[in-house]
Image (cartoon, rainbow, N blue to C red):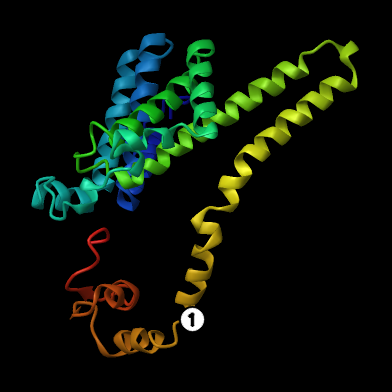
Amino acid sequence: ALASGRTAWYALAGCAAGLTFLCHNSPAVLLGVAVGVLLVDRLAARATPRRGLIAGHAVLALAAALTALPNLLVLVGHYGLGFQNPVPARWVWQALRHASDLPRLFTPSALLGLAGLAFVALRRRERVETRLLLAWFATSGLALTLLRSLPLLPPHHMLGYFQIALSLGLGLLGAELLRRLGAWPAEAGPWRHAAATLVALAAVALAWPTYVGRRDLAQAGAQAEALSQRPNQLPAYEWLRAHTRPSDVVLASDELGFQVAGPSGRGVVAEPSLWA
């Protein structure tokens, strides 16, 4: 859309943004921030006629709003952006609950990620990619702290995007180290390649313990396999699909409502507080 300036491409981009919001509001918020950064960048550069740029983004915003209308009507029109279930917004990252937990933030990979973000902020601030990354990092960081009470920024989801930004910073720092090693004089010979290999191995060694100990690799796979078999629950799921209507509501425990009644496409009386 920015390259062509055509209204149709702006409309398609808006539809894509609206679909993102229908899927999940957290990435949609980050996408909106990115669109704002790009718009300000183009306006400041004066490389594109201002009137056409603003008109195109107005089309984008309208298309996004129309596509996301099913959710917006409920969230804004019916609920007025008010919390019906306050539990998710009260969630606080464990490392931010008490001052004594702060050292957990300063893991080696997190510190290196911050160093990478600081590097691109200082040395590549003229690039729009840098501004997009820093806006991503700032938005997700604020969602974990000062803005965690806002209904469209659930902190337990924005934590993942915050950590992705740190991971990108770590990758950029590693890429810069490798670039500088590659710029060594040719006379360095094999030492240049050896140093680059050591940097890559150090990065793997730093990330490996955290990676192999991740819950989604260590326990979640086995739990998902067990849930997919669950011989005592699959017949109940099939019975609900065959003998009830989609408009029916099922009274069940938290676990059965989440694992049987919900997947069968039937309403439930209550879900676990973080899923309701």
Q: Point out residue 70 in the picture as x, y percentages from the top left corner.
A: 22, 53
The residue depicted at 90 percent of the width and 11 percent of the height is 187
Residue 268 in view: yes
The residue depicted at 65 percent of the width and 25 percent of the height is 175
- Is disc 1 surrounded by few (<14), some (14 to 19) or many (20+) residues within 10 Å? few
Q: Point out residue 191 in the picture as x, y percentages from the top left corner.
A: 86, 21
**Residue 66 in which image quadrant:** top left
Taking the image as shown, residue 108 lies to the left or right of residue 60, namely: right
- Residue carrying label 1: 229
Q: Amino acid at mark 1?
A: Gln
**Residue 189 in which image quadrant:** top right
Residue 18 in view: no
**Label 1's element?**
helix
Residue 244 lies, with reference to residue 38, above or below; the image says: below
Placement of the C terminus among the 4 image quadrants? bottom left
Q: Point out residue 87 in the picture as x, y percentages from the top left corner.
A: 20, 53
Q: Residue furthest front?
A: 100
Q: Nearer the viewer, residue 243 or 203?
A: 203
